[in-house]
Amino acid sequence: MSDNKKSAMYDLTKGIIKENPTLVTLLGMCPTLAVTTQASNGIGMGLATTFVLVCSNVVLSALKKFIPSAVRLPSFIVIIASFVTLIEFLMKGYLPDLYDSLGLYLSLITVNCIILGRAEAFASKNTVFRSALDGIGMGLGFTLALFLMGSVREIMGAGTWMNIAIPAFSPMTIFIMPAGGFFVLGVIIALVNKLANKKPPQELGCHSCPNAAQCESYRKEKGECK
């Protein structure tokens, strides 16, 4: 396999486990904890975020040379907000029940740290194709994390899965409460780290961040750029 194909495959798959935005870099915690009381909500929020992430990555990568550094962040937010508005209109028109379930958190995709983080760390520094792959991979990782959390919390807390009742099961309401959300998230993060054979960093700093190689501050610290 050529280096270009390896790089493309890595860009597409890194967000699923190795750099999962929710379970590894711990971004996007608000929607992760708030909307995952049902598996269907997790899928809906994840796919909506994936749509915005891919579209904004592509546009920002294409326009990166034309956006002045002085207004970079406001420009990012305007572009992201445009796609969030579009997905809101589509969901309100075609999936009104899901739109009502997600509520305010759908609008808050605009300031989701995952989208702003990928815009700054990746899309603004790479090609349109690589940025699209990065958006797809990170979005799928986010969607899978929310779906897994939503499935566990719905089964344990409501005795249903995808709104289908599970017979002869006694639910525990705490799992659909905030405390249950934190507990399930912690357990899933521990399992993912165990499967990935990843140990906690011995000391804090840029070098322990999975996005360190793409971070300008880290490269300056190592003398790779000035």
Image (tube, helix red, strand yellow):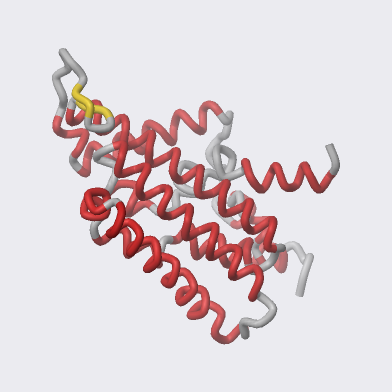
Quarter-of-image position of residue 222: bottom right
Q: Of 2 and 170, which appears nearest the observer?
A: 2
Q: Is residue 159 above or below residue 202?
A: above
Locate residue 173, reporting x and y percent.
14, 32
Write the residue at 43% across / 72% down.
82
Locate residue 111, reporting x and y percent.
40, 66
Q: Is residue 219 above or below residue 173?
A: below
Write the residue at 58% across / 55% down.
205
Q: How many marks?
A: 0
Q: Quadrant of the C terminus?
A: bottom right
Q: Quadrant of the N terminus?
A: top right
Q: Residue furthest top?
A: 168
Q: Is residue 19 above or below residue 73?
A: above
Locate residue 223, reporting x and y percent.
78, 66
Q: Residue furthest right?
A: 2
Write the residue at 57% across / 30% down.
196
Query: From the viewer's perspective, is 54 left or right of 38?
Result: right
